[in-house]
Structure formats: C-alpha cells, structure tokens
Image (tube, rainbow, N blue to C red):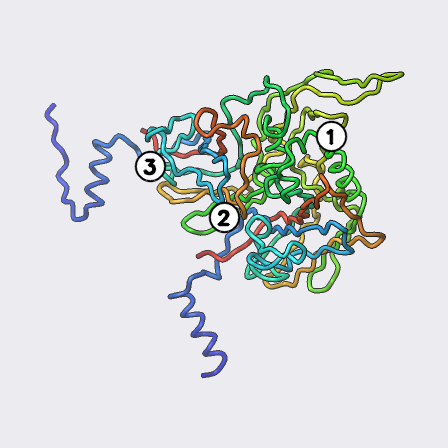
Amino acid sequence: MTPEKNQSLLNILAARVGTADWSRWQINRWQWYDYVRYPIAGTSALQYFVNPLGGTDPTSNTQKTISQTNIDKTRSFGQTYFLLEAIRTHINPRPKPLQTTAIAEDADLLLSDQMQTWSDNLLNLMQSGVLSVEFGSKDYFQVPKPFQMCPPGFGVDAHEHGSVQTWGSFTQQNPEAENIYRVSPVQLIEPEQNVDVKITFPAAVVPLAQLTSANWLVDIGVIFDGYIARPLQ
Amino acid sequence: MKYSPQKRTFTRSEEALSALQERYGTTDYSEWQSLRREWYSYVNYPTAGASETLFFSDVAGQAGVTTQSTNMPKANSFGQTHFLLKQIKMDIRIADWMYNLPVANDLDTLYSDIINGFVQDGVLEILISGRVYAQIPRPFLLAPPADGRPCVRSAGLEGLTLATGTPDTFTSAVTHPPYASLSGGKRNSYIMDPNILIEAEQAFTCRLRYGTAVPIIATDVEDATTNPLSVGCIFSGIGFRPIT
C-alpha cells in the first residue's frame, strides 16, 4: 500500500472509529505547573518540566505527585497546543505537618523568632536568580529576579502576625494578581515542542538557613498560565 | 363552547410527549431564563487530612446535609438546568474561629493552617464526563474566595516580660492573636476564561487532591465533631432554566 493510501485509510479510520476529532478543537484555561525541591545548600540551577508526574525529584528523591506537577512527558506538553499568557513563580515552603520531624513537631514555630529566619530566607531568594525559558532550544524569555518580576500573584491575607516571643514575622511573595508577569504578545507552544525552563543563580548559590536546627523543605514552582487547545473527543 | 381537541395521530412517542407538554406541561422548554447563579459545596476536612476530597457529590436534604453545605439538586450534576461556569472560588469555614482564646502555640490558631498548612498545598481538578477541564495548583491561593473578607485589626501588646537589671532587659513580648485569611478582593478572582458550559444532567467531578494528606495544625481549634473545619468550592456563573 502506498503512503498516500495509508494516510487516506488512517483518516477514514480516525473519522469513523477514532477517539479524537482532530478537525475540531476545544480551548480551556489551563496551567502547566512544576514544583521542584530547593536544596538547603543552594544550587546553581533549578530545572523545570523535566521530571513528569510519577518521576523522581532530584533533590528530595521522592516521587513527584499531582501536588508537584501535572506534566506527563519530559520537557513537553504532549499532544496539545498551549497559549502562554502569564508566567508565575512560587516559593512554596512545604506545609508544616509535612516538614522534617523537628520542624513539624515544633509547637510554636509559626509564632516564634524562627519566622525571622523564614523571612530572611525568602527575602534572600527573592533578590536572586534568572528565569530562562527556551522553546526548541531558542531563548524566548530571560527574566531577572524572577521571584519578584514573576510573582505568583496569589497568597493569603496575613492581616495580623502574632508572636509569643520577641520576634515574629511572616513573608510571602507578592500575592496581588495584578502584578503577575504577563506574556504579551502571547506565546504559542506547539504539540511536542521542546520546553526548557530553568531558574539559574549565576552569581552565587543562595543557601537556606535551618529552622529549629533542621533542614527546611521548600519547593519552588514555575506555573505557565494560559490556554490549552485539545482535539474534541 | 364545547372543547374539541384537534385529532392527531401520534406515530412517535416524542411527538406525543411534545404535544402533551405543550398542552399540559408545567415547563416551557422552548423558552429559557438566565440568572446569576452560585453552586456551592462545603465538605468536612478531616483532622488527619485526606489525599482526595470530593465536592458537589452531596445533595441538600440528605442526612446531615443542609443548604449551609450545598445547594446541589443532584449528586455531581446540576439537574435540569444548564450552567455557564465563569469563576471558581475555594473557601474554608469553621463555626468558631476561637479568636478570643489565648494563643500559646501553633495548635491554637487557624492562622497556622493558613500560612503554612493545607491551604498552601493541593490541586483542584474538574472533570466533565471523565475529561479533565481544570487542574489548578494551590487552589486556595490561586482560586481564592475573592469576596468581602472581614478586616481584623489589633493593637499593642498583650504581654511583655522584662528581666530585672539596670536597666531592665526586654525578654519577650506576646502580641494579640494572629489573623490571616484566604485572599479577598475581586481582582484576585480565578476567572474561567473562556467560560465552560455544563449542560443539564452532565455528570462532573470536582475534587481537591493532595500528593500527601496534610493534617490540620490547629487541632486546639478544630474539633472533628463539635467544631469541624470545612473546605468549600463555589462555582459562580450563569444558570439557564426553562420557563415554568
């Protein structure tokens, strides 16, 4: 059978018994996200969208769950088009109950002077880094101080911080939606396009100070916010 | 005048149904009314946390479920109405915030769970007829209630300890209770753009997922039976229903 006939047969089969209708596309708001564990000693680079759901985080050596990522393929968004409309970064300390035992069991950690260390760690991180985004090995975005230039645009309203000791504070990245990094003009990422996203720390690594004499578990995420186009099913 | 119905021969049950509806039906399916609509579902968040929490699977009126928890007419479906989903809001609710109790440690205040608890993790998934339509990371943050949150302001110190010396040495201070909430303000809304139309009787699943279950920190505040903590999901949009 000639290649033309093969194609023709494939089209007929797809139209008649296929599971997707490639002639009609559906568009939805969507986020592709990936959180990676930040090494306590700092690092020269964090790589994103490399280890898919079920893969292993290189720092924590734990399996990546739906909380960490929703990509199914390494460095690709699979058989979908994605219209990138905004880039968010998110410094995400793991919830206290999931931290190392010393931190999880510190009864007054969140109201204590340890929160000064929390704030200092985050403020140091927020001064650093360069976000690089490449598609098909061609550079598209290079953003300095990404934790401030590309804030998550979400967070909590911490109206009143409390303290049972002499010092107390709470720091998060900018939570206002109006401050997110908008990609304008929007960027289309085609199916199976190679995606290379990293946050580098070229000048110096930024170590995290310990909390309660224990290593603090912090994930750092990159969220691509935009629109997904998928064939109808 | 004597009523004389037109004589018709029904060869298909659909024709018969249509004629009967036209004459005796309570609903006019040819005309539709649109109105702003919130569909909401609050469910208990267990003290030990859960890897998956389902929303919209309870129905108002079933055992222990009131309209405080949900206004769903049917599990996982909006029944005989269409719904255009425009906005998603996540929320938490507790009957007694216990703001007036002394805060000695992290267990005594929901502030802990908000700044470094389950609120800071998780993914919200929406599946319609089994297909994933949304996968929102950190949904309590990215899809906040974006409403009119209460404003709490406190002033001054609650306690101050000095050590005897010359002069006395400042040792520790205790402030008023801490307070934090999910993000308010419409500007922080999670807008479903383009909107999603969920048709009448369309089955959907809405679930909050965690890679690892996150237990509640404020166990001195939350109580599984007398003061349970609920998490909620609100679909805000436009409802369409036939005129009756």
Chain bearing tag 2 is B
Residue displayed at 75% across by 59% down: A139
Q: Position of residue A10 (x, y in %)?
A: 44, 72
Query: Is disc 1 placed on a helix, strand or loop?
Result: loop
Task: Report the Cα–Cα distance between label 3 and label 1.
Answer: 60 Å
Taking the view exactly as shown, the residue that stands out farthest to the front is B164
Of the two numbered discs 2 and 3 on the same chain, state the one appearing first in sequence: 3
The quadrant of the rendering that contains the N terminus of chain B is: top left
What mark, if any, has residue B133 been given in the picture? 2
The amino acid pointed to by label 2 is: Tyr
Report if the CB atoms under discs 2 and 3 are less than 8 Å apart.
no
Distance from Cα at disc 2 to Cα at disc 3: 29 Å
Tell which tag, 1 or 2, sits nearer the viewer: 1
Of residues A202 and B116, the one nearer the viewer is: B116
The amino acid sitting under disc 1 is: Ser
Are the residues under marks 2 and 3 on the same chain? Answer: yes
Report in which chain the residue with disc 3 lies: B
In the rendered image, the quadrant that contains the C terminus of chain B is top left
Mark 1 to mark 2 CA distance (whole Å): 38 Å
Q: Secondary structure at mark 2?
A: strand
User: Which residue is disc 3 drawn over?
Assistant: B30
Which mark is drawn over residue A169? 1
B123 lies left or right of A113: left
Q: Nearer the viewer, mark 3 or mark 1?
A: 1
Of the two numbered discs 2 and 3 in the rendering, the one whose residue sits closer to the viewer: 2
Tell me the crowding category of disc 3: few under 14, some 14 to 19, or many 20 or more residues within 10 angstroms, Cα based: few
Q: Residue at x 71, y 21 (%)?
A: B174
Report whether mark 1 lies on the same chain as mark 2. no
